Image (cartoon, helix red, strand yellow):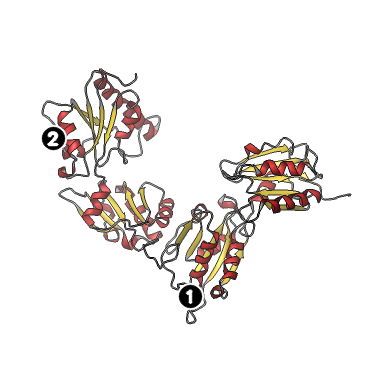
Amino acid sequence: MAPGAGTGRLWGVGVGPGDPELVTLKTARLIREADVVAYHQGVGKRSNARRIVDDLVPADVVEEVLQYPVTTGTAEHPGGYAGAMADFYEECAQRLREHLAAGRDVVVLAEGDPMFYGSFMYLHDRLSEEFETDVVAGVPAFAAATALAATPLVRQTDVLTVLPGTLPEAELARRLADTDGAIIMKLGRTFPAVRSALEQAGRLDTALYVERASMPEQRWLPVADVDPSSVPYFSLVVVPGDGHGARYDEQSPRFGTSSPLADGEKGDDVPKRGEVVVVGLGPGPDAWLTPEASDELARVGHVVGYAPYVARVPQRVGLQRHASGNTVEIDRATHALELARSGERVAVVSGGDAGVFGMATAVLEAQEAQPHLHDVTVRVVPGVSAVQAVAARAGAPIGGDFAVMSLSDRLKPWPVVEKRLRAVADADLVLAVYNPRSRSRTTQVADMQRILLEHRDPGTVVVVGRDVGRAEESLHVTTLADLDPESIDMKCLLVVGSSHTRVSPTGAVWTARSVDR
């Protein structure tokens, strides 16, 4: 049924966190004018949303009480908790659908804001394409919480992250360490794990617990002082951005808080006890992280790197994380060296092997360019490289002489890439290709194919490995002539065989060890 005349309108309205005076004027008007007022509530409980607007609901309005069948993660339903809740929301939608089809306007009450962890969203999913639907924003609970604690949450370029306390503890700790300010919702029985995650992320000392914000019984105190047995559902944790991550300071470096040594300082009296260890994390699976790399990561106080790689390092107490974008290698290398010069032990992380198109070269390059960093100790810890992973999955295509190249022309001009491709082709070497294609570089794979076909047989074996070692892994064996450049992206690594590369009867790709010409 398309929305049209003769049907009622569905409203999702936020009634705020608890104080009736925080209900917006628009929401108040809609409640007074409603034909039907609907709200969710737990078994044996009174709806908090309904309580907030007691003075606004007309005496003659039709009320639809949408009572949850379960409120925890267990249920006797064949589909478990998720199945029970899906059936419940479908039943609720059908009850409201009948009112709307009869031309009645339905106002659904939601605590806080309707689209912020609210049950109204599931009704919106089911009804908005059938009936005219509008949403009225409400004051979210975390806004009331920060007002109660009079605590600035984020400033300037600080990043705010809203997290459910139901996340796995390790994941919660990682995300807390990676953000500036944070709000943690859905406490209750999750509180002990939340407290532990805060401690692991080094955020416990500044985290604030707020209970029933804006309600008469509201209170707040440091998370460290909270009795876990006393934590109700209507509570949350505020983690201020102040004191963590980047502050607004024109003198501070690009990444994080100010280094103890600013540029230009001599630092002759600073003890030289820190170091930078550049660690290769491998292509993806934890099983491919070497014991040496794992031991090094367990000893450092700081981890610096491209954000997806930093995210792979488990959070623990005392570990500070410095994540950044993909094109600021020298900046992050310099930051790591400065931290080490001040006495810190720092790990710079790379995917695969840090010495193969990774951060090892960037760290040494940054160190060479800045004389005041020359006395910082730098060590490189090897990792499983992407070419090793793809080759192993395929068989043994790099069992003989081979070359490794990147098709990216960000650090070298394309004519240099072409010259090297011709040299590799002329030498009849197996070629492993990194960074084959990106959103802005769309022609290089086709250009490589054309150049190689000037020297190689069209039937030359080509292996295309995508996301090898991860859940989305795929491996495709084709030929140089049949390679489709449009199918290649940055998640791929290519291995182009030599004249001595072949496919075995079982499908394994391998390159002969002996060469007779």
User: What residue would you read off at disc 1?
Assistant: 264
User: What residue would you read off at disc 2?
Assistant: 56
In the rendered view, does 5 fall on the left or right side of 75?
A: left
- Viewer-nearest residue: 269 or 371: 371
**Mark 2 vs mark 1: in front:** 1
Residue 488: x and y, percent? 63, 40
Specify whether residue 432 is in view.
yes
Which quarter of the figure is the N terminus placed in? Answer: top left
Q: Residue at x 58, y 54 (%)?
A: 351
Specify whether residue 299 is in view.
no
Q: Residue at x 58, y 52 (%)?
A: 287
In the image, what residue type sits under mark 1? Gly
In the rendered view, does 24 fall on the left or right side of 2?
A: left
Picture quarter containing residue 51? top left
Above or below: residue 200 compared with residue 473: below
Residue 273: x and y, percent? 51, 76
In the rendered view, does 62 fall on the left or right side of 372?
A: left
> Marks 1 and 2: in contact by CB < 8 Å?
no
Residue 299: x and y, percent? 51, 66
Residue 347: x and y, percent? 53, 64
Q: Give the spatial CA distance, label 2 vs label 1.
A: 65 Å
Circle 1 crowding by C-alpha within 10 Å: few under 14, some 14–19, many from 20: few
Q: Secondary structure at mark 2?
A: loop
Picture quarter containing residue 136? top left
In the rendered view, does 97 fall on the left or right side of 53?
A: right
- Viewer-nearest residue: 202 or 387: 387
